[in-house]
């Protein structure tokens, strides 16, 4: 089963963390929550979910994880001002490890300069940002690029997103 790094901080979109987390754990995978600093709790932007942060980014090595999950909301934008977090995310893209990003999640991958030539989707307000980053934007509920990068647009797309992230890990034997 996969060990999945989850980059998350305050103001994440509650259900964009809780729903994929449930789907991944139901399939037997383990999630490790990572923020700029560990040993704290973060709260979703709707106040419906509170998440205990397992580790600070300085305390983890991306090589110790099989996949990366980036929930949406304001969290990705708040995380991408930290070079350590950006480098951590970039590792997964450079190594072609599975990456799951929903809604505003791809913002972190834009800052990591990891989307040029890739096919992706995301929340409509970041469409132009994705295109400027060199990605080809697809207005679809879920898009899987090169059997590695899974992206979705909004909470409405969670059933498709959850299905594809679990499927991708299974297809990779994780």
Image: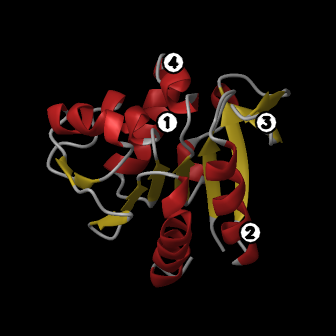
Q: Which mark is residue 172?
A: none
* Circle 1/circle 4 CB separation < 8 Å: no
Q: Residue 52, image x and y in percent?
A: 84, 38
Work out how far the residue at label 3 is from the one at label 2, CA to CA, in angstroms. 17 Å
Instruction: Identify residue for label 1.
Output: 88
Q: Residues within 10 Å of mark 1 (few under 14, many from 20)?
A: many
Q: Is residue 113 above or below residue 66?
A: above
Work out how far the residue at label 1 is from the one at label 4, CA to CA, in angstroms. 10 Å
Left or right of 130 on screen, residue 143? right
Along the polypeptide, which appears first: circle 3 or circle 4? 3
Instruction: Identify residue for label 4.
Output: 82
The residue lying at 32 percent from left, 47 percent from top is: 94
* Circle 2/circle 4 CB separation < 8 Å: no
Work out how far the residue at label 1 is from the one at label 2, CA to CA, in angstroms. 22 Å
Along the polypeptide, which appears first: circle 3 or circle 2? 2
Instruction: Identify residue for label 2.
Output: 25
Q: How is the image coloured?
A: secondary structure
Q: How many marks?
A: 4
The residue lying at 55 percent from left, 60 percent from top is: 66
Along the polypeptide, which appears first: circle 3 or circle 1? 3
Instruction: Identify residue for label 3.
Output: 53
Q: Residue 11, image x and y in percent?
A: 66, 28
Work out how far the residue at label 3 is from the one at label 1, CA to CA, in angstroms. 16 Å
The residue lying at 36 percent from left, 47 percent from top is: 122
Work out how far the residue at label 3 is from the one at label 4, CA to CA, in angstroms. 17 Å
């Amino acid at each position: 089963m996969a060990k999945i790094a989850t980059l998350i901080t305050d103001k994440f979109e509650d259900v964009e963390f809780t729903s994929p987390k449930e789907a991944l754990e139901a399939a037997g995978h383990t999630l490790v929550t990572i923020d700029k600093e560990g040993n704290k709790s973060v709260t979703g932007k709707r106040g419906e979910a509170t998440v205990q942060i397992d580790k600070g980014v300085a305390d983890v090595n991306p090589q110790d994880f099989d996949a990366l999950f980036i929930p949406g909301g304001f969290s990705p934008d708040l995380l991408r001002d930290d070079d350590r977090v950006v480098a951590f995310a970039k590792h997964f893209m450079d190594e072609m490890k599975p990456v799951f990003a929903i809604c505003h999640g791809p913002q972190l991958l834009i800052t990591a300069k990891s989307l040029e030539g890739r096919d992706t989707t995301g929340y409509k307000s970041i469409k132009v940002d994705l295109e400027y980053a060199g990605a080809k934007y697809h207005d679809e509920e879920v898009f899987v690029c090169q059997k590695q990068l899974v992206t979705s647009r909004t909470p409405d797309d969670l059933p498709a997103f959850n299905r594809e992230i679990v499927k991708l890990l299974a297809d990779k034997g994780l």
